[in-house]
Image: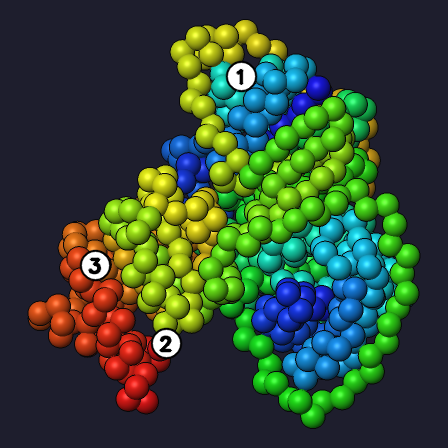
Amino acid sequence: MSKKVLVLGEVREGVIRNVSYEAIAAAKQIADGGEIIGLLLGDSVASLASNLIAFGADRVVTVEHPHLKSYTSDGYSQAILAVCDQEKPEAIVIGHTSLGKDLSPKISSRLKSGLISDVTEIEGSGDSALFIRPIYSGKAFEKVKIKDGIVFITIRPNNIAPLEKDAGRTGSVESLSVEITNLRTIIKEVVRKTTEGVDLSEAKVVVAGGRGVKSSEGFEPLQELAKLLGGAVGASRGACDADYCDYSLQIGQTGKVVTPDLYIAAGISGAIQHLAGMSNSKVIVAINKDPEANIFKVADYGIVGDLFEVIPLMIEEIKALKVGS
Amino acid sequence: MNIYVLVKRTFDTEEKIVISGGKIQEDGAEFIINPYDEYAIEEAIQVRDAKGGKVTVVTIGGEDAEKQLRTALAMGADEAVLINTEDDLDELDQSTAAYILAEYLKDKEVDLILAGNVAIDGGTGQIGPRVADLLDINYVTTITDLEIDGTNVKIVRDIEGDSEVIETKLPLLVTAQQGLNEPRYPSLPGIMKAKKKPLEELELDDLDIDEDDLELKIETVEVYLPKQKAAGRILEGDLGQQVKELIQLLHSEAKVI
């Protein structure tokens, strides 16, 4: 049976995040011919609605309110529950981002629904859809389904391909007025620590450093390489523990789990905890002085050598490649 | 301050996962306190030491989880509660686990509840926010700093690498992110003392549980291991050539740059 699916378009710094377009593609599979409603929340977001439609939403509902300018679980849940009340969706898809992780359990609790978090793949469609998600940080996978009620999932960025953008698609955009009251959280300030705006969990390329990077300055060539490839810098626990970088960069069983197209591990030995966080990346390059390093076991391509020699050479080669193409 | 910490017994991060009979094998595996929950326990102890009060650690599980509760007591928690579901329930999902915890907590007059932001086994991160919602208290996830002044709370939380500075009030549930603190190791006197600290064991009958609400919402169809990758290619030749070859391979074969 076809389903009516609600998709949250997550807006970050005035732009809809990529994962929301991926969520529309996931919604399409669950909808099985049913309607896809994009949802935008904020203080001024209606102008972004056409993007959701171009990527596959059939129509868009917006809720605009000064209290929705910044995300709070209270504000967003009031808005989403009001939309659910009006639209009665049979499925909901949200990105498994910082916002999605914080918000979705509360919505699910209110709707008394199940919630499948961090989905990386969907098998089948409509009522027979099965959802695949990593467990034990990617050391294993489980295939699950919602027994009954609303099909509510969050999807991991970078795993489900968005639909092709079709700027010619049209659909209605309506705004719903919702009273947002009693916010229990006040956001005083957001301190940006991430570099150049490429988010680690959504990055197509991740250049990660381990103990072999030796110092915080040692991360500079990695940053240069990441920037050149439009990617983000990550780190192993070893590098974070040694204070070479912030814990927010840590990839592994504790820390972030990433699945970029290209993962470059520099000076990382490849402890099982680190592998859990990155071994599902599409292509893995390992650079390590120790030919016995565990990281080579999961690498597609390996170079046995000093990262401080290899990375500058890579930067040169990539620059040459870009000039040539 | 009446402080509760929600903890989970999980596989040691060193463990390899073995599946047999469609289930993950637990025999012989080492278990630990979920690493994010350790930050929550440490923070609870620090808050209690600064403000006074009591820290109670709570878990749902079987007898085996007593070991992790004793570890938490050895770190410095005052009391522990095991909600033993071994005989009553085959399986839990996030909604049933949160419901059981909330039923336990609802008449406890909590000031602060701490939990890990995610368990490294199931990996859903749902329990904290769900429990807070059921108790109708506010929650803040992935916190890296916590300051309490009376009932006013100032928090720094990690949002994908950036930091958000938040003000809110008690009662509150927070979930711990890495960087919140450096969890202590239990000291020898701590371990000795922990043996005498109260560890209460409850069953579902002791709580005001409605069986209908223990209906699972999610069904696991299959559990499997990721596909083994074919062995990779270690490049050879002088370093300059290797790098040249690597970039060519990434460009033409893997098509990722």
User: How many residues crowd mark 1 within 10 Å: few (<14), some (14–19), many (20+)?
Assistant: many
Mark seen at residue A35: none
Q: Tag 2, which chain? A: B
Label 3 amino acid? Phe
Label 2 amino acid? Val
Separation (CA) of disc 1 from disc 2: 50 Å
Number of labels in the image equals 3
Report which residue position mark 2 lands on. B256
User: How many residues crowd mark 2 within 10 Å: few (<14), some (14–19), many (20+)?
Assistant: some
Residue farthest along the bottom direction in this orientation: A168
Report which residue position mark 1 lands on. B76
Which quarter of the figure is the C terminus of chain B placed in? bottom left
Separation (CA) of disc 1 from disc 3: 45 Å
From the viewer's perspective, is B109 left or right of A265? Answer: right
Report which residue position mark 3 lands on. A308
A306 vs B84, nearest the viewer: A306
Q: Nearer the viewer, mark 2 or mark 3?
A: 3
Residue A212 spot, x, y in % from top left: 24, 49
Q: Are marks 2 and 3 on the same chain?
A: no
Q: Tag 1, which chain? A: B
Which quadrant of the figure has residue A25? Answer: bottom right
The residue drawn where x is 32% and y is 58% is A220
Q: Secondary structure at mark 1?
A: loop
Relative to B13, does residue A122 appear above or below in the rendering? Answer: below
Q: Marks 1 and 3: CB-CB under 8 Å? A: no
Which quarter of the figure is the N terminus of chain B placed in? top right
The residue drawn where x is 33% and y is 67% is A225
Residue A236 spot, x, y in % from top left: 36, 49
